[in-house]
Image (cartoon, helix red, strand yellow):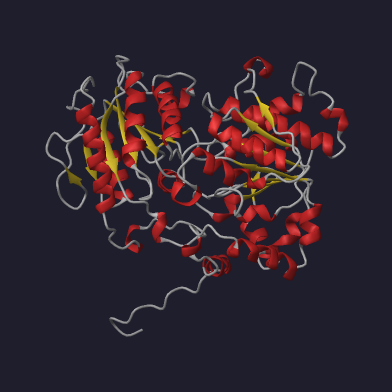
Amino acid sequence: MADGENESPAAPTPYEEAMEALSSMINQRTRGTKTTIQFDLLFDYLKILELEDALDGLKIVHVAGTKGKGSTCTFTESILRNCGFRTGLFTSPHLIDVRERFRLDGVDISQEKFLAHFWWCFNRLKVDVAIMEVGLGGRFDATNVVQKPVVCGITSLGYDHMEILGYTLGEIAGEKAGIIKRGIPAFTVQQPDEAMCVLEDEASSLNVDLQVVQPLDVNLLNGLKLGLEGEHQYVNAGLAIALSFTWLRRTGHLELANQEHAGSLPEQFIKGLTAATFQGRAQIVPDQYVDSENDGDLVFYLDGAHSPESMEICAKWFSGAVKGENQPDKVKPQVFDPSSAERVQLEILLFNCMSVRDPELLLPPLMKTCASQDVHFKKALFVPNVSVYHKVGTHNLTSSTVSEPNLSWQLTLQRAWDNSMQNDKGREAKQVDHVPEEKNDDSGKSGGSESSSVVFSSLPLAIKWLRDTVRQNQSVSLQVLVTGSLHLVGDVLKLTRK
């Protein structure tokens, strides 16, 4: 090869080719289109593929909602799998790899199986039960091609995707209620009156007795803990139990179904609820690139909250976790010298959200709820998501492949945070000696030498700053809350695991 001649790029792998084909099918302009045109196309695709009967033959649990629908699906899948059924689980979005959306018997589908069935992947419909999470809304969501589910569920409703679903709880509830089918049992949880009225009216018009499920009684777990952290998960678990019992009864599995009113849960249900796992929701991940014996301590608290209500729930969970409540021993702050003096624990926020969301509605509830639990953020870091610059399949986080982003939105987030800090006059400031201030260079844009926030031009640079901080300060334990975007959570997971 002549000097200066570039090597030819490596040929794409079969999996990369499949991802390229998958990405080519996505039209970003249709995400916010609230019409039946694109939705009707899905039924045409089913006819072309001759899959209408196969889809109707699936025994499906269909779940919509604003908050908790992924967790409810996860609990339901885990319960029914532990009852001995072959399960298929569909959730969205994925955090790192598109294959996370498709779980067979609790495991992400392998690359080999994904490739073997990509062009005719519908052969994988042969499961005993499919639990399907609605992606957006309900009425016009892609999953609503399902016309004959066994049972439907609607989780807690709140304000999210308002530019698409509507600006009132009634409008949003109307879209979510679109998954309810005539004569098919439907369940929901306690809702605000405005939302509940709409759900009940829609159910009544379809001859459905909409049943309201109470949160799971903790005593039914026999002293064990739910596999998913957070008090709100007892609401989701209660719904998952109702969906599971109903699916069992309507599919003829009466031995288990008849235990519904026995005053206790079947052993398989308890195992399913306590063994359930779901990435990016109330998840604690120690950074594997930091030597906790010789450096400071760096732990990431990951939660994909992105609505005002979920922000408050996230803040309650994080506050309890950093104070050691229900926190695994392996991620508690460690001792750094023979005298057994504890490291100085500092809370950091790592945040981003979509530009269609209002940071004035997201950041204050997060800050105030944490402050009410005596947890105060030393610094807030605002970054662009890395994954938005890549295609749908997997997230390549190599900084050299990412073009320089426009940081105007992150600067808007920073201003919203700084305004909230100024308005929070009762806040008790922590000592600043343990965390170095950022230089106003390529690493980030700070509001000044004493700023409580900084904008980094990329997520890898923010992670590098956090790691450098604990490596230079052995006495520091940084507890980093990552929230505001599931995409951001997925990117952090990718960067913190070897």
Q: Is residue 383 left or right of residue 53?
A: left
In this view, the residue in front, 84 or 468, is 84
Residue at far left of view: 449
In this view, the residue in front, 277 or 60, is 60
- In x, y percent, where is residue 373? 36, 18
Q: Is residue 451 left or right of residue 470?
A: left
- In this rendering, the answer to whether 36 lies above or below 206 is below
Q: Which quarter of the rendering shows the N terminus?
A: bottom left
- In this rendering, the answer to whether 495 lies above or below 3 is above
- In this rendering, the answer to whether 16 lies above or below 82 is below
- In x, y percent, where is residue 115? 64, 64
Residue in the picture at 45% in, 32% down: 309
Choose top left, top right, bottom left or bottom right for residue 202: top right
Residue in the picture at 26% in, 53% down: 407
In this view, the residue in front, 392 or 173, is 173
- In x, y percent, where is residue 16? 53, 66
